Amino acid sequence: MASTLEDLQAQVVEQGSSSGAFRQIAHYVTHHWRDVSLMSAVELAEACDVSQSTVSRFCMGLGFAGFAEFVRTLQDLVREEWKAPDRTRYLRRSASPGDDPLIAEEMANLSQLPTLSQSAESKAMVQFVLRSPRLILAGARASATVMPYAAYFFSKIRDGVECATPDTPVWTALASRVQPDTAVLAFVFPRYSSALLDWLGDVAHWATPIAAITDRRNSPVESLARPVAVVPVARASLFDSYAAVMVFINYLIREAATATPNIEDRLQALEDYETRRRVYRP
């Protein structure tokens, strides 16, 4: 599959030479990349004045299983160009819950997790989050929204969990000097924050170990982190959705707990304290 938009454009142009209908599709696609990345197959067919089956054949001729795989690849290549106003088209959809594009995409994303959970990257990530006495969870803007969930539950199974976001003291300290016995787990999702990536570069300068959870291969964090777990996010809404990411975080927490000695005693001590303090109402 194409790894750059230029590669995909060359393939689309070549496919367009096959027939008149394909030429119409190729012409429209190459002049409306961003719009097409947010379209359904029906919408593209109407825009090109061809049938939906012709659109499917065009995409299969490019080597994709169908339109859905084609548009997902296109989204990977152009989504940094998406603006919130572009996505308001999802607000106008009248789909029933059974064919809502967001739910369908999240279900597809979740279906990838069994394979991901057995990957070498996932196993290395479990060891990474347990290895250092101090674990810093780092993110910025939308990527930081998953951090409170991760920090709350990681703190139940291990000590030394902190969060770093722009302009916090721990953020500044990590970028400015060596931090012994410290590791950073970064959450890096679109739209990729320049502040986060620049900061990770500064942290890497001090040889602080960095791991990352991101949404695709060739993510800008790949040159800065090891291991890197790729967990897809859903794009078919006004803002990205992180259902698969949240499930993967929970999976990491569970596997890390499994590898933690005396975890039952630790959890029981927390439970006893919360019972004494009447943390929860009956």
Image (cartoon, rainbow, N blue to C red):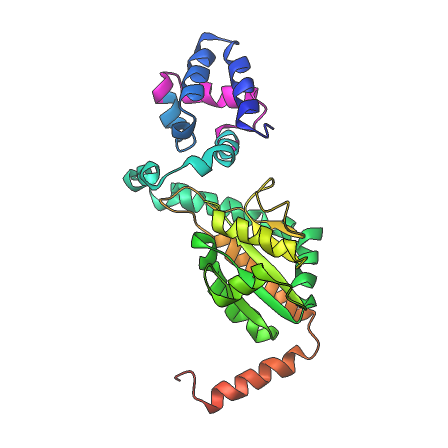
Magenta residues, dominant SS class: helix
Please tell me whether residue 54 belongs to the stretch shown in magenta: yes
Q: Please tell me which residue is depicted at 64% across the width and 45% down the height of the picture.
A: 223
Q: Magenta span has 75?
A: no
Residue 178: % across, % down: 65, 63
Q: Quadrant of the N terminus?
A: top right
- Identify the residue at horizontal 51%, vertical 58% (top origin): 246
Q: Give the range drawn in magenta.
A: 46-69
Residue 150 appears anywhere in the view: no
**Front position in the image: 52 or 209:** 209
Location of residue 44 by image quarter: top left
Position in image of residue 209 (x %, y %): 67, 58
Snapshot quadrant of residue 174: bottom right
Q: Is residue 1 left or right of residue 21?
A: right
How many numbered marks, from 0 up? Answer: 0
Coordinates of residue 104 in the picture (x, y in percent): 45, 43
* Residue situated in front as seen by the camera: 208 or 131: 208
Asked if 116 appears above or below 260 in the picture, the reply is: above
Q: Where is residue 32 in the image (x, y as percent from the top left)?
A: 40, 24
Q: Report the front residue among 242 and 30.
A: 30
Q: In this view, does 33 lie to the left or right of 46?
A: right
Establish if 160 lies above or below 89: below
Q: Residue at x 45, y 20 (%)?
A: 30
Q: Which residue is drawn at 61% across and 67% down?
A: 135
Q: Is residue 145 visible?
A: yes
Q: Is residue 127 above or below residue 190?
A: below
Give the position of the C terminus as an image quadrant.
Answer: bottom left
Q: Residue furthest front?
A: 176
Q: On screen, 28 above or below 93?
A: above
